[in-house]
Image: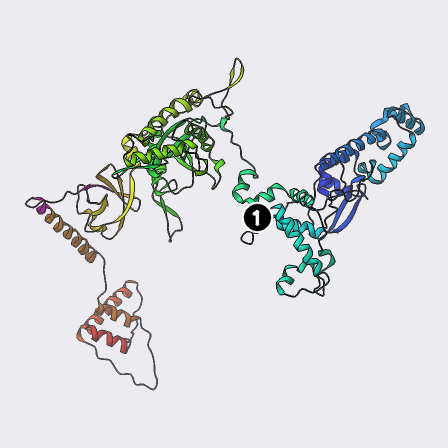
Amino acid sequence: MGQSLTKHEVAALTGRSLRWVERNREQLGAVPAGIAPNGRPDLRYNLASLPADAQRVWSVQSGSNLVQLENPTGQLALSLTLPAGPNLSQEDRAEAERRYRAIAPLVEPAQYRAVHLQFPRRAQLLDFLAAQHQTSARTLYHWLTLYKEGGLPALVAKERSDKGRPRAFNAAALEFIQRAALPQKGVHGVYSVREIFRAYEEERKWRESHAGRQLRTDFDRRKYARYLDEDGRLRDTALLPQASYETFRTWFNRIPEAVRVLAREGEEAFHNTQEIISYRDLSALQPLDYVVMDHRRLDLFCLIPIRGGWKLARPWLTAAIDMRTRKWLAWVIVETPSSDSIAAVLKRVFIDFGLPKAVYWDNGKDFVCEYFEGRAVQSRQSGRVGEIWPGVMQSLGIRVHHAIVKRARAKIIEPNFLAVSNLDRTFPEWCGHKPTARPERFHSLVADHEKWIRGERAATPFRTIHQIAALYDEEIRYRLNERPLEGGEGMQKATPQGRGWRSPNEAWDLLIGQVERRDVPLDTLQFCFARRRQVTVRNAEIRVTFAGRDYHYRLAGNPVALTLYNGRTVELAYDPLDLGDVAVFCENRLLGLAHCAELRRMGEDAFVQDERDRRASKRVVRQFIDAIQHAVPLATPEERVIRRRAVAVERIDPDRPVIAAPVSPACAEASEALARDRAYSFAADETPIAAVPPPPQSEDDEFVFFSRG
């Protein structure tokens, strides 16, 4: 019997619809192979019953020698498992197609009507085909019989049925190789092929000694549960055959590389070498559509100033490039990257080139911070998210896009850092990207530096961070931006010699004229880049500490306005370089600008003004209290007792005589007033007033009344 195919596979091979395949299932050799999940018969179609074109398509598609798992996990098929279906080599497929072309007029006479009209008798046609293909008529009859029985694969000699299967291994051996080659995290380390071979020999001897016996420990019984029979004895199929080390290497390499990399080298290696890659259409962008930013540690050492001297360390580069042209827009070299270095680069970009539409950067805490993206607070009442402060980017109308976590390939600035890495190699202070990559000359530089520290040398061989920053400014501006970017997407140009490449500056000058510049006033830009801090208002002022010094801020024009915000948390927007004036926000609302109050000196009139402000603040608070007390009504304790008695339910106890409770004169007067009000309200509605006896007073009401009266 030939290869069996599913309905979808037949439709794909024939180019017909699924309904057509179902209607012609009898002609296509459909046979039931079980019950489908929907309860209907699971039909399989014979490859030999398909048209010749479909069989040729199948023969071409099956050239990849795909294999299947006995118990597949997901859609993955390991090459270690047994192959299924015809296994034709490239030469066998070519021979099968050659033989089919020889008998094609006999198989499909409708397509060869001219040949049949020329040779109406079958014997004449066979002689013509035999002469044309240099074979005999008997051979053509034999090929035709084979094709009718097994289809196109039957036209060639049948290969050994176990081709693609190991002769030295059984299923248990293959399973052991897979288990040992794919380590479990936290259980054992990564075994080499030699170590797997040694473990295999130990396992083989152990299983031979326990064959047909019941395992003693519960651990062994759970571990070898799939190899035990109903009586709990180790089956013969669990025995491992003896094999050579070269056989192990062959079948170890049959494991797909993606599986081996993920299991043995980890997720990072799998992401870098095995996963699919997304390619951006950079030519569809315009300059300043996206500005890409990131940090990079330079591969050199320099002197960084500290209190009382210098220290030797590797500086960092914070840079921003344009995604379309890969032009270096702005950069700074600092000791440690932070949100301050990012803000310095962004300011330079906004001032020199205008506002971009979006920024594309990393997921580090210096990028994902309240300073740039604001802070959101979840509201318990409405369930919506309200931003207390939108941050720099939303204030300027710039969208923020974050790269995929742990994907260095996601940021286009990473390959451009290779040019910076090559630039590091040109400096004598180059140290390599890790300690093991230190050049030999670097150790002599460190020795000379130590002599300079001890006073045995007049100068150090290392330059300061300011000198390094000046060198990089010149190199990036006049070297990297002017160098042709070979292989860059959207950077091709026509030259007399053929295809050439544009430099970032050349591409920028060509395209920037099509982009409308978005500028922002410098004072607004300075306000947006102000730092934020949450503080609590105390004593009608905001007290903060910068660099060990206390600052006291009061609202300009109304120093006592913050009195009503005592104990509440507000946001302070300040410029670290100018702490004289700050902006105060509360619940996403600007309260105003605040000035720093100077320290009072003895004998100044400022103390008198402070006393006036204190009295004014008390007067404002008292006026607020009085306004609330006179505007909002509140019942007195006596009125609350009367109202409870008016709506209380009468409780009747037949065994207890009704005794009138004593009523004070004030309570009687209040009751009469309440009765008059009720009578007036009923009369206004023209409703007859019924004589309702006053409800008896409970003991609780009497206690409450006399305890407060």
User: What is the span of residues highlighted in magenta in the rendered image?
Assistant: 591-609
Quadrant containing the N terminus in the rendered view: top right
Instruction: Identify which residue is drawn at 87% across, 35% down.
Output: 144
Specify whether residue 353 is in view. Answer: no
**Residue at (84% x, 37% y) in the render:** 147
Badge 1 crowding class, 10 Å Cα cut-off, few under 14, some 14 to 19, many 20 or more, is some
Inspect the image, locate mark 1, and give the three-letter code of the amino acid beneath it. Answer: Val
Q: Is residue 260 left or right of residue 594?
A: right
Residue at the limit of the structure toward the front, as seen here: 456
Where is residue 386? Give x, y as percent: 36, 46
Q: Residue at x 38, y 40 (%)?
A: 367
- The spot of residue 59 in percent (x, y) is 75, 35
Magenta stretch: includes residue 599: yes
Residue sitting farthest toward the bottom: 655
Residue 485 in view in this figure:
yes
- Corner quadrant of residue 289: top left
**Residue tagged 1:** 190
Number of labels in the image equals: 1
Q: Nearer the viewer, residue 494 or 165?
A: 165
Q: In which quadrant of the rendered image does the C terminus lie?
A: bottom left
User: Which residue extends farthest left?
Assistant: 603
Viewer-side residue, 546 vs 680: 546
Task: Return the x and y of residue 623 as percentages of the image width and height.
Answer: 16, 53
Quadrant in which residue 303 is drawn:
top left
